[in-house]
Amino acid sequence: MTYEETMARYDAMRRNRGEAPRRIEESRFFDMFEVLFPADWHRVGDTESFRVPECQTDDLYTFCARIGGQHYELIAPKGTTHAQIIELCKSLEDDE
């Protein structure tokens, strides 16, 4: 990704207050889990979410979630709750 493309992505994230969830492979989920000690890690029933402790830009962070056997990645404000993350990921499933 070029510098200009990176800056355009960050500008879009700032305007949109993040990036929508996208489905990822299980291996990506665990790679993100092991990069740094996960922050805000929650497990409720068959759901799980955590935040990568380093920000992307401003107060926007990468979150990863698991619902059953499906894994997701999204960028959202630091204060986004586990319930909100799971709801966002479930809305992705509803759109498909």
Image (cartoon, helix red, strand yellow):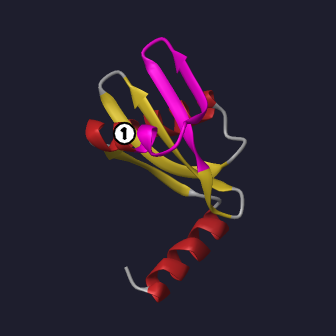
Q: Is residue 75 left or right of residue 28?
A: right
Which residue has dot 1 on it?
Answer: 29
Task: Please tell me which residue is depicted at 44% across the width and 38% down the height of the picture.
Answer: 33
Does the magenta run of residues contain 51?
yes
Label count reads 1
- Determine the image quadrant of residue 2: bottom left
Query: Up-down: is 86 above or below 75?
Result: above
In the image, residue 31 lies at what x, y percent?
A: 36, 43
Task: Please tell me which residue is depicted at 48% across the width and 78% down the height of the picture.
Answer: 6
Does the magenta run of residues contain 36?
yes
Q: Quadrant of the C terminus?
A: top left
In the image, residue 4 lies at what x, y percent?
A: 48, 88
Task: Please tell me which residue is depicted at 62% across the width and 63% down the height of the picture.
Answer: 16
In the image, residue 25 lies at what x, y percent?
A: 27, 41
- Residue range in magenta is 32-53
Give, as a three-letter code, the residue at label 1.
Phe
In the image, residue 8 lies at what x, y percent?
A: 52, 80
Task: Please tell me which residue is depicted at 57% across the width and 28% down the height of the picture.
Answer: 41
Residue at the outermost bottom position:
4
